[in-house]
Image (cartoon, rainbow, N blue to C red):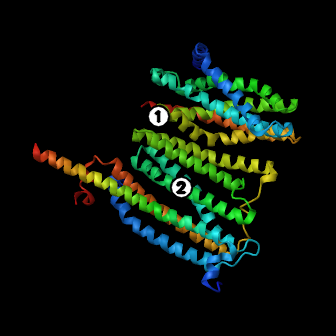
Amino acid sequence: MTETNNFSKNRLVNWFKFSSPATFYPVAGKLIPFFWILTALFGAAGLWISFFVAPVDAVQGQAYRIIFIHVPASWMSMFIYLVMAAWAGLGLIFNTRLSAMMAQALAPIGAWMAFLSLWTGAFWGKPMWGAWWVWDARLTSELILLFLYLGFMALQAAIDNPRRADKAGAILALVGVVNVPIIYFSVKWWNTLHQGASVSLTKAPAMAQTMLWGMLLMALCFWMYSIAVGLMRVRTIILEREAHTDWVRQLNEVKN
Amino acid sequence: MSALLAMIHRDLLLVMRRKSEVLTALFFFIVVTSLFPLGIGADPALLRKIAPGVIWVAALLSTLLGLHRMFAADDADGTLEQIVLSPQPLVLLITGKIIAHWIVCGLPLVILAPIIGIQFDLDLSSLLVLMATLLLGTPVLSLLGSIGAALTLGVRGGSVLMSLLILPLYIPVLIFGAGAVYASSVGLDSSGYFSLLGALLILALAFVPWVSAAAIKIAIE
Amino acid sequence: MWNSPAEFFAMGGYGLYVWSSFGICAAVLLLEPLSIRARKKAIIRRLKQERLAERFDKESS
């Protein structure tokens, strides 16, 4: 009986051990190069397919290749928002600082992904539909997602007390997560109502196998990149917020 | 229940002593809606087309103007802390504050809207639809706004930040509210929009007071 | 698929759009880690200065 108790206690302790910034910092440091290598590999494979394997599209010509970054960026912007909200929520429930720091680290990456999605969407739309911006449901929702990211970052920046900023940000992120489907649905509704302006940017060319693979590989590349940069940023945030602690002062980087 | 009514009564009493604050927000609504024809041109067909959107956006902005008053004054003189500490459930008290805010900021918009609508040459049925959508939608605006007000309590540059936080959340209300009026003005069926607005209101009533209460507790401690 | 590098860069006339898109992507993916590195250097520098200041205080007291 005591053996099983010890076993489960060990497992519990081990898991929560990583919620301490002091133990997480070196672990993250060792993981980062690993994720950069994956980024490079997936990126190389994805770009190879984007440019040298995927055939020309009959309708859109070579410009459709933008899809190989537009769609992965959109996917990542939405995925990162979910992950960010999840971390923030965990931080709120378990009162762990590190979870909140992780959410703080992910926000700028997600915002950049949303920005890339909008930019590539505009540069895809211009040659195809003659306008830099069409009020397409997907693009409009992406714009609102960017606003949600910026709001999260602005709120955290405006509140001085770091723990209050963490918790307030968490509430905002969770409210945002609940609202994203509602917003998306309402924008789609709005799009179909005002028929005139709607041109579907998402009517991509019929997906050849190769195109799907290209998008998948580029999406994986962005995902690995997000993890790598997220870990890099969270390490810096840890240093900034735990500056007063002993373990930070004892770091090799600081001593030399 | 009596705590709820007491809260509403208290907030309304405080507003009555300082009517100018409320009236300025209402005048803002009127002025802003007048700006659009001045900026775009007075072609009646065009005005009829943009009226739902313009009036709804003006309603959003006017609500935003009045939101900081929900918690800021009480926070400044320490009353908010007492409210949090009181034995009455915080959720109930906050709901009271939101209702009082709606009575002061949202309800007047519902009453004023037909007048503005006439300026934009809307016909009677569209005016009625407009009032109905505002009646359903402005409570949602007050509810969602309370989250923003609570999160940015006491923060530097709070009101601008609050607008940035809340406006994305307002977008569904705007789309369904203005969409309903537009649909009815071109002869389409607007009942779907009302169902959606009603659903948003119910969802907001069910969840927002708890979220705002949590946000207030975070802001206070 | 591409008969010459020139054709590759022209992208069937859509070169501006394709390369602007891939270009901004590359720019963001490069600049973000660089900015984080700069931020990290700044905090490390601050920590080092604080450490030196503490030691100075201890030695002189």
In this rendered view, identify the residue nearer to me: B158 or A32.
Answer: B158
Outermost right residue? B187
Task: Name the chain under label 2.
Answer: A
- What residue appears at the point 47 percent right and 20 percent down from the top-left corner? B79
Label number found at residue B155: 1
Say how many tags the image has. 2
Q: Mark 1: which amino acid?
A: Val
In this rendered view, identify the residue nearer to me: C22 or B179.
Answer: C22
**Proximity of marks 1 and 2: CB atoms separated by less than 8 Å:** no
| Residue depth check, mark 1 versus mark 2: number of the one nearer the observer | 1
Tell me: residue B75, above or below residue B214: above
In this rendered view, identify the residue nearer to me: A93 or A207.
Answer: A207
Dot 2: within a 10 Å radius of its alpha carbon, few (fewer than 14), some, or many (20 or more) residues? many
Left or right side of B10 for A250? left
Does any portion of residue B80 appear in the rendered image? no
The N terminus of chain B - image quarter:
top right
Label number found at residue A6: none
Circle 2 is placed at which residue position? A110
**Residue A111 location (% of width, % of height):** 54, 54
**Residue A30 location (% of width, % of height):** 36, 65
- What kind of element bears circle 2? helix
Left or right side of B117 for A187? left
The C terminus of chain B - image quarter:
top left
Tell me: residue B114, above or below residue A215: above
**Residue B113 location (% of width, % of height):** 76, 27
In this rendered view, identify the residue nearer to me: A147 or A234.
Answer: A147
- What kind of element bears circle 1? loop
Dot 1: within a 10 Å radius of its alpha carbon, few (fewer than 14), some, or many (20 or more) residues? some
Q: Mark 2: which amino acid?
A: Gly
Q: Quarter of the image holding residue C22?
A: bottom right
Does any portion of residue B207 appear in the rendered image? yes
